[in-house]
Amino acid sequence: MLHLILKRTALAIPSLIGVVIVTFLLTRALPGDPAAYFAGPAASKEAIEQIRVALGLDQPLIVQFGRYVADLARGDLGNSLSTGLPVATEIRTRLPASAELTILGLLVSILIAVPLGIFAATNPGSILDHTCRILTTAGVSLPVFFTGLILVYFFYYQLGVAPAPLGRLDIFFSPPPRVTGFFLIDSLIARDGEVFLASLKQLILPAATLAIFSLAPIARMTRASMLAVLGSEFVRTARASGLSPGTVIVTYAFRNAMLPVVTTLGMVFSFLLGANVLVEKVFAWPGIGSFAVEALIASDFAPVQGFVLTMAVMYVVLNLLIDILYGLIDPRVRIEA
Amino acid sequence: MTAAAIPNAPPEVPLLDVRDLTVEFSTRRGTVQAVKHVDVTVGKGETVAIVGESGSGKSVTSYAVMRILDRAGHIANGTITFGGVDVGKADERNMRDLRGREISMIFQNPRAALNPIRKVGHQIEDVLRQHAQAGSDDAKTKAIAILEQVRIARPDERYHAFPFELSGGMCQRVVIALALACRPQLLIADEPTTGLDVTTQKTVMDLVVELTRERGMSTILITHDLGLAAAYCDRVVVMEKGRVVETANSHAIFSAPNHPYTRKLVRATPRPGVTLTDLLPEDDAVSRSALRKASAINGAAHQGAGEPPLLVVDNLIKEYPRKDVNGGSFAGLFKRNGAASPDAPPPVFRAVDGISFSVRRGESVGLVGESGCGKSTTSTMVMRLIDKTDGQILFDGEDIGAIPARQFARLPLRKRIQMVFQDPTESLNPRFTAARAIADPILRMGDEKGTKAVRARCEELATQVGLPLDLLDRFPHQLSGGQKARIGIARAIALKPELVILDEPTAALDVSVQAVVLNLLQDLKEQLGMSYLFVSHDLNVVRLLCDRVIVMQAGRIVEEGPTEQVLGAPAAAYTRELLSAIPHPPL
């Protein structure tokens, strides 16, 4: 098993190198001249040229790349032109906000979708099966910003049960001392129940928005793969051996059905990272999605570069984790390694 | 066949009594009766075979006995009494106690019948614990003991094995261990050896018989193989289209079959001392036999002894890189092409280890051996689908082995060597109609141009292989196994090849269909003067179709010669072993 982990990690290195190269080239290919933007609308040609030299944008690409890699090695992602802050700092403060939201959304979605899928598969044609179908169809067909707005309209505006969709914490609370950057965890560490509840309240609507969006693929995949496994011969053997329905469904069917579900989870997680951008906008969430969009509109390439790089690294790490999880579930994968 | 199990004299109260059983399936086109008014009884300690072809309802009957029918199926009529319990009326909880503890089942395709990601030892423990035969402290010991009883070597090691780490025969032993773990009274074996090699079949069947007899168990053997049924069972129940047509003592079934269907089945079973035409139903056989005689003279003319052989294989070798034997260390990742240490096993595995043989024009040569002996690798190389490692493949004097497999598909030579594949369903594109499937090679390399000409050729071929023309526009799923086999054959002969490689072409077919297809192949060979390279593990089929036989073991040829000689008076010990493993029905 250790061997598998080491090997997969080693295989992740080339992808990371590729990511560094691609992010660099991609941001250079963006339309818009950062020097012109930085100089301001009233700047003269000479001023723009001066700034170009100051930013090193007049150098050949290869030199710029060398400098970029050297900076990266020191953990320096450059400075945001619009805020003036180092991109690394921005990402460090904003990433936990996005991560907390995405992970909670995914968790909620898994907790609902997987049991729903299993139940739908074990009782095909039942009311819950149809409910599952309607829910999943609705989930994929509604865009996240729309679901988000609807939720805000009902739960905040109409019913008044949810707090105002304005960031991670009500303005009357101060954030807990930073340990992980996740407000839920940090407030627990600080033993501050009020802050915990307050940040949870803020999280519920955006997390629900993401959960509704990701429910569909997970529930459908669970249902489909459970149906396939339930029809397989080893499940018939298990039934013929008189094993209880619980053992048959959980130990025999579900563990096997999990393999495609785990793969789907990886994809769903990456969809969610994308969907985040819109959700963060709707809920004024100080995450890296909204940060990246603002930077992109401003042709501020350092934050965009930093964002794409962070996302790509997260994606590579996520895939690594899924591969390892796969190996834990399926002994055949371990052997192939 | 102990005294307790004398046929014709079942004990007063049978262990299992199935009366007037009807099983229905609800489908989109309404209700289908898969089993109609079936009566079967099994006495204590008795071994009963249920024999029938696909669709006869033999498996459904057994599923009904265990009440593990699909959701769509239900028992519509009749009673099933097992040891005094009315199975039809028992509640699900009682049935669960019955399954595995009193009645258990072993299945076809043992590897698929085991949970692929659970250790086999744990799977046995699951059954033991479910039926309170073991607690958490002694479950492991008991599981290992059961593995030992089914003759698995090093059981404490194998306890931790996953199904994919075991051979097919070994997996079937584990399935048997699962079934016998709780010492049930009745064992239902559903095609337990289909897909296994003939020698493995013998060891598995012998094991089942020994274990069940030792425990005084009753057995139901469900099989399509009349020979197997008669060799291992006391009584044989023959089913056709959901009905029982005959129940007889296994001695009587071969010597004096009563029902016409049983007679047809007995005739169609390949066995020593018969010819191809003997397999066909009586009236059909007479006309066919006369025809064959007339064309035999033609056939003999084709087999020119003086001519140079059509195919010469000389010292052919195929090596595969061995999978990392020492588990693959992390360092191994970086020195993939590094030199192997001297004490390591050879870095390659020789699937085919220097074999030489030839095939004359108009001759059929059988290539036999157990799975893993290299027969399929050999045929695939001759077919030029994979490249050889070393040696020569001379086809009509030309070294086709030197042409890379990738290029071969584009050469006109491709037309001259064609293949009929093992699984008639899997080898057809499910989105192609029969006509389109047959037309495929014609469109690629045929002389016929234009839709009409191609269609005409397809119809001609369909007529040649006996496929009704109105079936040409159907898709594979709308056709029967035999019809799909005919399409596969029509496709193979579409380009008038000189050599056709037949890779177990009848292994997936029912015996009566097999009989027809084998006769068709023989007729086509005589009409078209083709040569066959017939790859099979079924010696009885090879005996019927082939002029010469090559027996392979572990990549080498162990014996070669005329069919009568090799199968009649085998010289090699391995050939004798193969022959003796074929079930011999009591005659």
Image: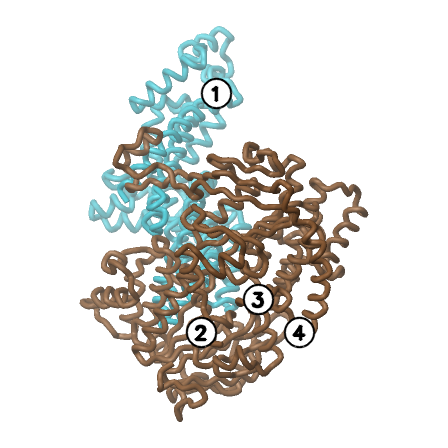
Name the front one of labels 3 and 4.
Answer: 4
Are discs 3 and 1 both within one chain? no
Q: Which quarter of the picture shows residue B246?
A: bottom right
Q: Which mark is on residue B282?
A: 4
Residue at position x 22%, y 64% in the image: B140
Name the front one of labels 2 and 3.
Answer: 2
Characterize the local packing of mark 4: few (<14), some (14-19) or many (20 or more) Cα atoms within 10 angstroms.
Answer: some
Extreme residue toward the front, this view? B306
Left or right: B25 with respect to A58?
right
Q: Is residue B17 visible?
A: yes
Give the residue type that dot 1 points to.
Answer: Arg
Are discs 1 and 4 both within one chain? no
Characterize the local packing of mark 1: few (<14), some (14-19) or many (20 or more) Cα atoms within 10 angstroms.
Answer: some
Name the front one of labels 3 and 1.
Answer: 3
Query: Chain coloured brown: which letter?
Result: B
Give the residue type that dot 3 points to.
Answer: Asp
Q: Which mark is on residue A28?
A: 1
Give the residue type that dot 2 points to.
Answer: Ala
Q: Which residue is mark 2?
A: B231
Q: Tell me which chain the residue with mark 1 is part of.
A: A
Instruction: Classify mark 1: helix, strand or loop.
Output: helix
Instruction: Classify mark 2: helix, strand or loop.
Output: helix
Ranked by sequence position, the earlier of labels 3 and 4 is 4
Q: Which mark is on residue B510?
A: 3
Chain A: its colour in the image is cyan
Give the residue type that dot 4 points to.
Answer: Glu
Q: Tell me which chain the residue with mark 3 is part of.
A: B
Give the Cα distance between marks 4 and 2. 25 Å
Q: Tell me which chain the residue with mark 2 is part of.
A: B
Give the Cα distance between marks 2 and 3. 19 Å
Instruction: Classify mark 4: helix, strand or loop.
Output: helix
